[in-house]
Image (tube, helix red, strand yellow):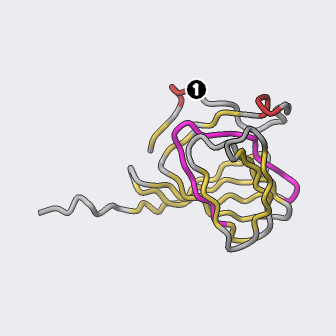
Amino acid sequence: MIDETKKTIEFFTPEVWSRVWGEEVLVAHIKGVCTGKLLKMKAGTRGGLQKHQVKNEAGHLISGEMLLEYDAGDGKITKVTVTPGQTVLIPTGVVHRETAITDCVIFEVSNPVFNDRVRMEEHYGEKIDGGLPTTTREEIKIG
């Protein structure tokens, strides 16, 4: 009898994507379960203010210091400093943005969804200042 509860972790030559804030490195994938990435952010850079349509994620700060901005559900942005060893959970639909106070390395684990972001700057009176655009539902990939 085959145990359907066992999953295979796929480790492979890391896939590296250059981002305006640094590098995103895809390092592991368990089909239908989760994806692991390293996010290498350069000091003073930040990601876009966004929410995800399908993806939820947990980020563990390995090194550096970052500012996490998020909407706690009241329509206002709350700011929290995250230090090495801390982990943050970003559920689906939560507006958030990370800013590297110093060079940072974050290990991110999420459900295996790629390209499902919705840019939120304009909803908070900000201008979009670069980065990846909003993804339509048709463009969402589930790994």
Q: Residue at x 74, y 38 (%)?
A: 75
Label 1 neighbour load within 10 Å: few <14, some 14-19, many 20+: few
Q: Residue at x 64, y 60 (%)?
A: 88
Quarter of the image where the N terminus is located: bottom left
Q: 100 above or below 46?
A: below
Q: Secondary structure at mark 1?
A: loop
Q: Residue extending furthest front?
A: 74
Residue 58 belongs to magenta span: yes
Query: What residue is disc 1 on?
Result: 136
Residue 12: image location, x then y, percent: 49, 60
Quarter of the image where the C terminus is located: top left
- Write down the quadrant of residue 133 in the picture: top right
Left or right, 127 with reference to 89: right
Residue 35: image location, x then y, percent: 50, 55
1 and 87: which is toward the camera: 87
111 and 38: which is toward the camera: 111
> Magenta residues, as a range?
43-60
Residue 97: image location, x then y, percent: 74, 47
- Write down the quadrant of residue 37 in the picture: bottom right
- Write down the quadrant of residue 80 in the picture: bottom right
41 and 10: which is toward the camera: 41
- The kind of residue tagged 1 is Thr
Left or right, 74 with reference to 67: left
| Main SS class of the magenta portion in the image | loop
Q: How many marks?
A: 1
